Image (tube, grey):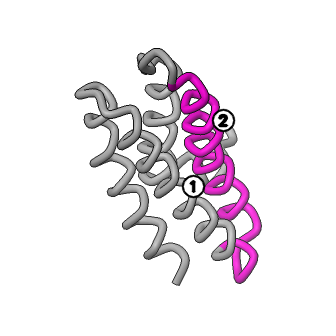
Amino acid sequence: MDYRFDHENLDVYKVALEVARSCTTLRIPTGRSHLRDQLQRAADSVVLNIAEGRARGGDAGRNHFRMAAGSAAEACAALDLVGSPEAAIEQPKLRRVGAMLRGLAR
């Protein structure tokens, strides 16, 4: 039997993971390299908080989903600052993640 954690079945987790992986290959403009670290930390935080929130459940889980939503907004803002067409492709995915997380945080 192949065990899977609950978060691995969530669409929000799958989309967030896709975005986090895409952010690792994103070209960052010269002079804005500090955004790479900020963006990657925020995108990774979304994925990690979804996993922990699902594992904890209850109020603690909802708190992690709220933190993940905040990190999704931060990553979206970092992509605004990057300002490339490549970065803009990830923003709708992050907005979708944010909307799904708002539902989970209720």
Which of the two residues, 81 or 4, is positioned nearer the viewer here? 81
Q: Is residue 11 left or right of residue 91?
A: right
- Could you say where residue 91 lies in the image, as x and y percent from the top left? 32, 45
The spot of residue 56 in percent (x, y) is 76, 68
Q: Residue at x 62, y 40 (%)?
A: 44
How many residues crowd mark 1 within 10 Å: few (<14), some (14–19), many (20+)? many
The quadrant where residue 6 appears: bottom right
Question: Residue 83 location in percent, x, y?
Answer: 31, 33
**How many C-alpha atoms fall within 10 Å of the one at disc 2: few (<14), some, or many (≥20)?**
few
x and y percentages locating residue 89 in the rendered image = 26, 34
Amino acid type at image mark 2: Asp
Bounds of the magenta span?
32-61
54, above or below 102, in the image: above
Cα gap from disc 2 to disc 1, whole angstroms: 31 Å
Mark 2 or mark 1: whose residue is earlier in sequence: 2
Q: Residue at x 66, y 53 (%)?
A: 51
Q: Which residue is mark 1?
A: 71
Name the residue located 47 percent from the left edge and 57 percent from the top edge. Answer: 73
Provide the residue designation for mark 2: 2
Three-letter code for the amino acid on which mark 1 is drawn: Ser
Q: Residue at x 53, y 22 (%)?
A: 24
Residue 26 lies left or right of residue 63; in this view the side is left
The N terminus lies in which quarter of the figure? top right
Residue 18 in magenta?
no
